Image: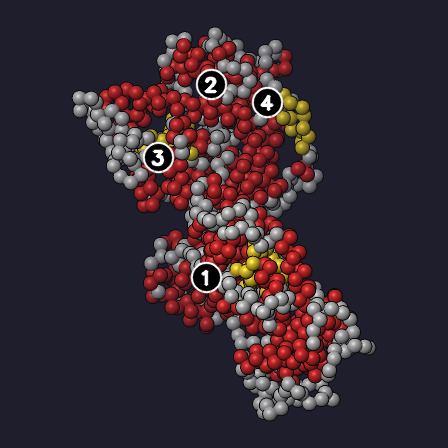
Amino acid sequence: MSMPSTDLSAQPLAASGYSRFVQRIRRRYADELALLPPGAPERAGMQITYDALQARGLDTGSALRVLRQLVMERLVVLDCDHVAPTLVASRTALPPEGALRLRPGEAGSAAPADGEPTRALIAAGVPLAVVTRAMTELAELALDIAICESRKPLDALHGAPQALDMPGAPAGQRAQLWVIGMGKLGARELNVSSDIDLIYVYDHDGETAGRADGRGVISNHEYFAQQVKAIYNLIGEATEHGFVFRVDLALRPNGNSGPAAVSLGALEEYFQVQGREWERFAWLKSRVVAPLECIQNGSAQAMRGSVLPFVFRRYLDYNVFDALRILHRQIREHAAKRAAGHPERANDVKMSRGGIREIEFTVQLLQVVRGGQFPELRTRPTVDALQRVASAGLMAQATAEALMRAYDFLRRVEHRIQYLDDQQTHVLPTRDDDLAWIAQTLGYSSCCPFLSELDTHRELVAQEFDTLLGQKSECKGCGKSAPAAPQNLDELLEKLSDQWPDKFRARLELWREHPRVLGLRDDARTRLTRLVQRTAQWLLEGKVGEEAAVRIVDWIEPLLRRESYLALLVERPAVHERLLRLLGAAKWPARYLLQHPGVIDELASDAMLHERFDAAAFMQELQQRLAALRRTGEDDEESCLNLLRRAHHAELCRTLARDVEGNLTVEQVADDLSALAEAVLKVTTDWCWQRLKNRHRETPQFAIIAYGKLGGKELGYGSDLDIVFVYDDEDERASEVYAAFVRKLINWLTIKTGEGDLFEIDTALRPNGNSGLLVTRFEAYANYQQQRGSNTAWTWEHQAITRARFVQGSDSLRQRFDAVRLAVISAARDIPALSREIVAMREKVRAAHPIKRPHATLPPEGAPAPKGGPSALKGEKTAEKFDVKHSPGGMVDAEFVVQFLVLSQSRSHPELADNVGNIALLQRAEAAGLLPAGQGQAAARAYRALRRVQHQARLNEEPTQVAPSALQAEREAILAVWHTVFEAGEPHAGA
């Protein structure tokens, strides 16, 4: 037979006619080709064709095999006989350098070199999804038919398999065999000549019903083992019509040595006891693909409860990096062996460097590492997964798009390789005419631009994959040789370097006999050794301090049994370094990170340090994660609670890192923590209401009013929330419903789960305090605050409302609250009486917080003798400590001054009514002429300085008391404004 001409443009036949496989089909099945409905093959049309083939006398297996030939011929025609318009992709469409990363900031290189010429990419054929969907639906149809047909003879011999009489399995119920599609079949992206990776699982143990004569009873295990063979005969065995699909069962538990079908219970036990890390990647794309009846009635959903916990771990799981490195190395070694003596096999578009498998591994690694905590990453198709990891900030969008283009290109090439002869190969052909045909059907004029485009995509994929796994080439020209690593952890601990600081060495010496250290597995001991060495090296280089090095030892010790944290730090040196800085900065971060170690992954991003909290994005991500949990049936109450806590802890960690790095002021920290608390309240309110059993409307007519630090946007780390709950609902059930709702809401916010808690809640500022109702009708709240009726608010409650802020509820309720607050603070008052009451309240607060007060010589020179308040200091004889909050001249004095000015002067000066914080209000009071020139500004600066001191003291878990001389100017500034407001008569009214 003569060879086809390489000059394909001179051929009269359509491109599909060049395929030797298509030629065979057209010769053999010319009469049957018209049975397949026009257009892209779909399941309904395939079913019609299958029925027509059976009507022509073909048995089940033969009809399925011929159907496959017809579908394949149609796909070659659709994909190769149509060339779309030219699309020019400039080099700017490629991702920038530093695009791929586990978190923003840890990037690989995906850009072409400067000056690289642009390339013309010709889009040809139908979208990739048309081909993969058709092949997937063909497999699903064939397996559904095969599983139904294979039952009939087995039922006749043995009766139907029955479930044991046990919970969840009603007596007499038929036990079902599920066909689990793995890999590309599970992801609905099957290629044209692929085998199908299957695992057979049956839902219940038991035995068959037997025949009418009582004979033929066998175990369900035996029944399903026979059915698996029958299914293979129908779709996998080669006959005169070929096969439907090549079948591979190697991914089943225990591989080729395992049983052909396993029970669901046995599968669960295998996952718990024997499941290996690489199998988690295999099961990531698993899906029940047949029988259709079990998918439609929902019984196949039982698989999820077993698979999800195996694939996606509760914590960030960096242990899989080593597992994937080993698996990938084995694949590359296998490919190298196959190519030995056959250099053409190096051009494998799937398995070679930069091939399809590396794109799949890239996205699957990110999914498996984080899918336990971020359910929105759980998806099977590769392209969808790439978009999701980009949306989650785990990969630059430009890189994701570049990998999508590479994936689409490589899959199209793969299909054309297989179109030629229907062989399960991914290697470029060596015949020039075959290669030219592939190039032409992809829209290229010749092989050269096609091969250039192929190399470009493969190089990009390989670079990003190597970057992800940390497989960077070593520097050979730096002239430095790394010190020899100890053989093992024992040797390291026995030979602690004399160069290491004494405190660090002494702490490590305790590990020599520590049971947790001695009980570590070999791989964990290796990781721990590397971490200790790296920490010591940075310590010697001066990158971290000794206190940080000691604290990370303290931090690691209780977590040694959770080896994923060791793996995370080894895999991400940037996280390790930033964690050391955070631990060395203060005591509170060290304790917080020990309670919530999972948040350290947030430290990987450099970009994160220069961002601010985004409430809208935070709430959107939470809703997406809840939707992802809902899709898999995991949205139970405990999962929701943990989802809220993980998200809150992660955001708090980001703010803490920015704070410690000096990128946020104290006011910005408070703003972000307050915005975070407000966002958590909004989401929790929404989720909690949706799960309230006795709710009587879709949206609650309910509001949350924040007081204290949350109301004033001055929240700190670990602050509790002072909040008041109100409702405005005329339904007769309202009081009962909202009381139950608030109790549930407080429980959601305060209960401790495995992920910790959210906030402590204080509702003492509600009407009538702790003796009042937990949730109040808004009208009653308004009457109480506005002195209507016999039960009204005290002056101290009006002081509190100056800092109150509406944080959750409808706009109409917000407007009504704002009106009530404005009416309260701008009401006409007896100013001297108000002054006496606020001074008296200040004395009560001071009495409740006794401190050693400084000398009485601090008021400004020339000030009159104090009549009361914080400057009444005569008789004090010692000057020991100054408490930045409670001492005279401290923060509370400034706050009481502001509250008095707001309540006494807002009627005349409306600008004081805004809840803008103490610093801004002191400045506004001076601008309004209520304070002498410069005094308000000085007090505002002093208050800011005291907040900074308090903030740093609390971060380091130290007392907020300092030597009086340390903050002399700040104390005098606040005492001066106190004197002006409370001791010099009316507030200053002029220049």
**Residue placed at 46% from the left, 69% from the top?**
504
Q: Are marks 2 and 4 in contact (CB under 8 Å)?
A: no
- The local secondary structure at tag 4 comes to loop
Q: Amino acid at mark 1?
A: Gln
Q: Amino acid at mark 4?
A: Gly
Residue pointed to by mark 4: 125
Q: Amino acid at mark 2?
A: Met
Q: Which of the two labelled residues, at mark 1 and mark 3, occupies the earlier sequence position?
A: 3
Q: Residues within 10 Å of mark 3 (few under 14, many from 20)?
A: many
Q: Nearer the viewer, mark 1 or mark 4?
A: 1
Residue 430 percent across, percent down from the top left: 52, 23
Q: Nearer the viewer, mark 1 or mark 3?
A: 1
Task: Indicate left or right for 564 with 942 as reference.
Answer: left
Q: Amino acid at mark 3?
A: Arg
Residue pointed to by mark 1: 595
Q: Which of the two labelled residues, at mark 1 and mark 2, occupies the earlier sequence position?
A: 2
Residue pointed to by mark 3: 252
Q: CA distance from mark 1 to mark 4?
A: 55 Å
Check the image and report above or below for 439 versus 93: above
| Quarter occupied by the C terminus | bottom right
Judging depth in this view, the residue of 105 and 59 nearest the camera is 59
Q: CA distance from mark 1 to mark 2?
A: 57 Å
